[in-house]
Amino acid sequence: MHFKFLKFVISRLLGTIVDTIILWILTQYIFFSYAGQYLAAPAISFEIAMFHNYVISYFWIWNKHIPIKVARDFFTRLVPYNISTLFGFAIKMSLLLLFESLFRWDVIYCNIAALLISGVVNFFLSELIVFKKYAHLSGNNGKHTAIRYK
């Protein structure tokens, strides 16, 4: 699990870079109001980074938990992954707004601090819910099945 957590941290650092760049673009060129900069822009940048992180999680971090990689499985797991990251997003946004009101930091610094804290929650949601480990078994007639470990 330690190696998996290291992979998770690396992928989330890349996701943080994606999130931060998108947030910067949105706050510099598209949104100019408080609601745009502190609500809409972080929501959009987070969702883009979520998809980036999901692709890395699916194909690199938890790839051994997925017995058969097909488009249907990819998109089926995307739904609970997105829900779990939306839960992490709620934590992130709460912290972002808290840091802004307490410390009056720029949105970029509030976002980075909030991402670091909410990332731990997202790791455990991914490990325990989205990418539960499966065993790959060959069934009759060469068909493959998967059994979920409990």
Image: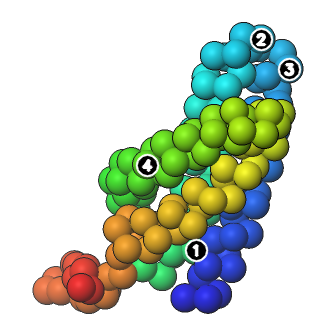
| Disc 3 secondary structure class | helix
User: In terms of sequence position, does the residue under pointer 2 or pointer 4 come before the other?
Assistant: 2
- For residue 79, say whether it is visible: yes
In front: label 1 or label 2:
2
Q: Which residue is painted at 71% across and 38% down in the image?
A: 102
* For the residues bearing labels 1 and 2, Cβ distance under 8 angstroms: no
Q: CA distance from mark 4 to mark 1?
A: 20 Å
Q: CA distance from mark 1 to mark 2?
A: 37 Å
Q: Residue 87 shows which numbered tag?
A: 4
Q: CA distance from mark 2 to mark 4?
A: 26 Å
Q: CA distance from mark 4 to mark 3?
A: 27 Å
* In-image side of 75 versus 6 (left or right): left
User: In terms of sequence position, does the residue under pointer 1 or pointer 3 come before the other?
Assistant: 3
Q: Which residue is mark 1?
A: 61
The crowding category of the residue bearing disc 4, from other C-alpha atoms within 10 Å (few below 14, some 14 to 19, many at least 20), is: some
* In-image side of 25 versus 138 (left or right): right
Q: Which residue is mark 3?
A: 28
Residue 51 to residue 26: above or below: below
Furthest residue toward top: 33
Indicate the quadrant where residue 84 lies. bottom left
Q: Which residue is mark 2?
A: 32
Instruction: Indicate the amino acid at tag 4.
Output: Phe
x and y percentages locating residue 139 in the rendered image: 18, 86
Instruction: Indicate the amino acid at tag 3.
Output: Gln
The crowding category of the residue bearing disc 2, from other C-alpha atoms within 10 Å (few below 14, some 14 to 19, many at least 20), is: few
Q: Which residue is painted at 32% across and 82% down in the image?
A: 134
User: In terms of sequence position, does the residue under pointer 4 or pointer 3 come before the other?
Assistant: 3
Q: Which residue is painted at 37% across and 74% down in the image?
A: 128
